[in-house]
Image (spheres, grey):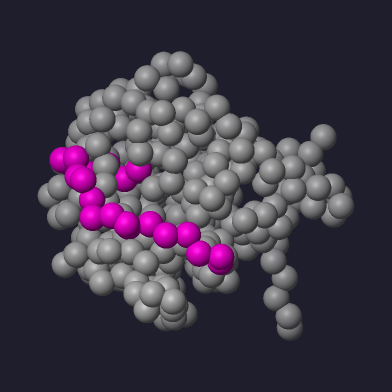
Amino acid sequence: MISTATKLANRSFSNCMMNAAGVWCMDEAELTAIDDSAAGTFVTKSGTLVSRPGNPEPRYYETALGSINSMGLPNHGIDYYLDVVAAFQKKNPGKTYFLSCTGFSIEQDQTLLRKIKDSEFNGIVELNLSCPNVPGKPQIGYDFETVDQILAAVFAEYDGPLGVKLPPYFDLVHFDQMAVILNKYPLAYINSINSIGNGLYIDDEKEEVVIKPKNGFGGIGGEYVKPTALANVHAFYQRLKPEIQIIGTGGITSGRDVFEHILCGASMVQVGTELAKEGPQVFERLTKELQDIMAAKGYTTLADFRGKLRHQD
Ligand code: RRO
């Protein structure tokens, strides 16, 4: 029997695959589709204190090799997602769900965590430190001092399982510096990577950008980003204390991509662009493809190969 089950933050999941925040998770109907799919669980769209319409459309565009988006954090507000997840928890008491959230200041992050603590939520919190698309707001994950201050404030407020969604880093020194900060805190996990921020995709025929906000600049996802995602997963796997697990996100279009993320050290994986392209049935295909690879290699559990990427001497 080949199992793609996993454990994260001491919770068990029947499958290691789930949606990436932002895709198929805006409202109850979309979350229901993921809940009913072969995915192990879902994460909600990042909820803010107050609901937001997001940036003007068109704000998402699919390309042959991936996607570009500048959604601008549209969401129904944290209270909506707390209510919706509470209903799922009632329906499936044995299942653990992820709630993503993000604030625009340390005080807002603390208020969000206080709300979550005071609610019935019993799942895992994913604090998004890496939204690339709010005009005038830099990605927090690139401001190391602020990340440190946010984590100190968050863990003063919240003692449930919590992970952070990080932007991609591109320099080994930055992996070193971030790992020192992350290792100071009782994080359940880190999630690498969010989209590669502020790419530009253009339509040559029209000689025009393809999305409206920010003069066409937006976060890049899909096949383009897999090597960057694998680098981030593996770099943090080598540097983080073993209690901090890793969710690998970025460039998953096949079971082989899932296999590679796990080989680099991921305990769970998230699918964004390919889920947007194929819909929730993508999880059945990816699971089957991963099982076929595991069977060919003689592996029966993820632990047989997780983090076991070989380096050359
Ligand atoms: O809503 C968005 O524009 C968005 C967010 Br919050 C994020 O974290 N990552 C992304 O690619 N888009």
Q: Quadrant of the C terminus?
A: bottom right
Q: Is residue 57 left or right of residue 234?
A: left
Is residue 46 a member of the stretch shown in magenta?
Answer: yes
Q: Residue at x 41, y 63 (%)?
A: 68
Is residue 238 a member of the stretch shown in magenta?
Answer: no
Q: Give percent across and percent down for residue 230.
A: 57, 66
Prevailing secondary structure class for the magenta stretch in the rendered image:
loop
- Identify whether 15 is placed above or below 264: above
Q: Which residues are magenta?
A: 45-65
Can see residue 214? yes
Q: Give percent across and percent down for residue 93.
A: 47, 19
Q: Residue at x 26, y 30 (%)?
A: 80
- Identify whether 74 is placed above or below 239: above
Can see residue 129? no
Q: Is residue 169 left or right of residue 277?
A: left
Farthest residue, direction bottom: 313
Q: Give percent across and percent down for residue 46.
A: 31, 45
Farthest residue, direction front: 205
Residue 211, quarter of picture: bottom left
- Identify whether 300 is placed above or below 180: above
Q: Is residue 10 left or right of residue 285?
A: left
User: In this orientation, which residue lies closer to the viewer: 205 or 277?
Assistant: 205
